[in-house]
Image (tube, rainbow, N blue to C red):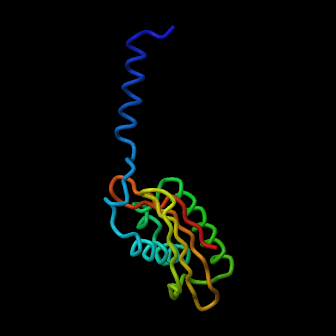
Amino acid sequence: MIYWHEFRLKVMTMMLHEYFAPQPTPAVDLPDPTPLLGSLTQGVLEVFAGVRELDQLARWFSEEAYRKLGARSNLAGRARSARGVPPVRPVFEVLSMRQTSPADGVVEAVVIVAGPGRTRAVAIRLEGLDRRWRATSFAVL
């Protein structure tokens, strides 16, 4: 049997959680995402190359995306170590960037980058949370 004070406490806790949880932000209240897409692409490629600390990008990623990025970064570091390759700053050129907005306050983009060895596609999903963009999904293909 649930008592009134337990029910009230549970409801208040849920309300506080919703109040303090990240709040969605409409696109009109957010800056142009294009510069951030380029910066995140460069930053992540530098993290994978071992010349940038992952923590420098933490504020721009959701918790889940940040954890996945950390796991991939660790794998890249181990592969570099196993081959005996030192960290080298990646040199690449952004060939193209395509963006779409499937919902208000959401941007999905693909950034095509060409490096000395190969061309890669970087898929990014940005969501407007707390009046700024945050990457909720990031994949280097």
> Where residue 113 sits: x, y (%)?
55, 83
| Left or right relative to 65: residue 81 | right
- Image quadrant where one finds the C terminus: bottom right
Quarter holding residue 10: top left
Residue 96 drawn above or below residue 41: below
> Where residue 135 sits: x, y (%)?
47, 61
| Left or right relative to 122: residue 56 | left
> Where residue 108 sits: x, y (%)?
52, 65
| Left or right relative to 128: residue 93 | right
Q: Nearer the viewer, residue 130 or 105?
A: 105
List the single residue furthest toward the right: 83
Residue 5 drawn above or below residue 37: above
Q: Nearer the viewer, residue 102 or 52?
A: 102
| Residue under the image location 51 percent in, 78 percent down | 97
> Where residue 44 sits: x, y (%)?
50, 72
Quarter holding residue 86: bottom right
